[in-house]
Amino acid sequence: MFQKDVLRSKRILITGGGTGLGKAAAQRFLELGAELYICGRRADVLQATVRELTELTGGKIHSYPCDVRDGTAVEAMIAAIWADGPLDALMNNAAGNFLARTEDLSIGAFQSVIGIVLMGTLHTTMSCGRRWLAAQHSAVVLNITTTYTTTGSAYVVPSAVAKAGVQALTRSLAVEWGNRGIRMNAIAPGPIPTEGAFSRLLPRPELEQSAKNRIPLGRFGTTEEFSNLAAFLISDGSGYINGEVVTMDGGEWLQGAGEFTALGRELNELEWESMKPKKTPPKSANKDGS
């Protein structure tokens, strides 16, 4: 589908690049000649991904442990990357989600998802964007949203709120920064099975078939399909696409939005209880109180 060097000389950062869709995109970008930077919260996962993808592709990939909720940590990471030269593209993929009845959620649960999805995207985009604008350096930002940003979806309300914000950011900055050489686009994927994440949102095996039945194409998407679309939107071949949210869901959105809504009738009380988000203790303060 692509020339093998279509992303050659492109330096790209993928947040949440150690697993799932981020990892799949990282592999494809490396295969197409890009130099990759990936970040995430778990250093051991990032290191394992670097080893695996280096062996698979022979490409150049670097990792940075970073919690994108922490604006100061993001700024330090971007500064470290820029020391070797500017990035050419940013893929905001880091996300958090869980299936839960909204009345069972604490404000902390909302803050956790919004912190990763919306604030994390804002931190990286602004840190890179200010540098690109100051240097008059053309670049691309690719955000990963979801098909329920405009309609909302029951039982994943923190995600719906946060992803809707990301979509608004994408379209707003596409207009504001487009005339200065920065393109902003997004992919809104439907169900694409990845290790771990998908099973947490579909706790019973038979719910997978129910989910497939809602998709006109009768199947889930693949990481390869996602990665190829991401590569196209990052590449110069999509140079006139700006401010677009590309839905990739086999037609599910057209058939009926809110892919988790029907689960309210499918899950029993025990399953709802088992999926309640676990409470995490607040971060301990430093000696200076910060």
Image (tube, rainbow, N blue to C red):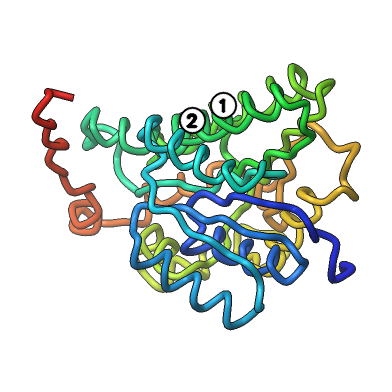
The residue drawn where x is 67% and y is 41% is 86
Q: Secondary structure at mark 2?
A: helix
Q: Toward the viewer: 161 or 153?
A: 161
Q: Which mark is residue 126?
A: 1
Relative image position of residue 205 (x, y in whole percent): 40, 73
The residue drawn where x is 14% and y is 36% is 282
The residue drawn where x is 72% and y is 61% is 34
Residue 146 in view: no
Q: Which residue is farthest bottom?
A: 55
Mark 2 crowdedness (10 Å alpha carbons): few <14, some 14-19, many ≥20: many
Circles 2 and 1 in contact, beta carbons < 8 Å? yes
The residue drawn where x is 46% and y is 48% is 260
Mark 1 crowdedness (10 Å alpha carbons): few <14, some 14-19, many ≥20: few
Q: Which residue is farthest front?
A: 83
CA–CA distance between discs 2 and 1? 6 Å
Q: Secondary structure at mark 1?
A: helix
Give the residue type at disc 2.
His
Residue carrying label 2: 123
Residue 168, placed above or below residue 142 = above
Q: Where does the N terminus fall, quadrant-wise?
A: bottom right
Q: Answer with left or right where residue 179 lies relative to residue 15.
A: right
Residue 267, placed above or below residue 120 = below
Relative image position of residue 44 (x, y in whole percent): 34, 67
Relative image position of residue 95 (x, y in whole percent): 45, 46
Residue 83, placed above or below residue 193 = above
Residue 170, placed above or below residue 64 = above
Q: Where does the C terminus fall, quadrant-wise?
A: top left
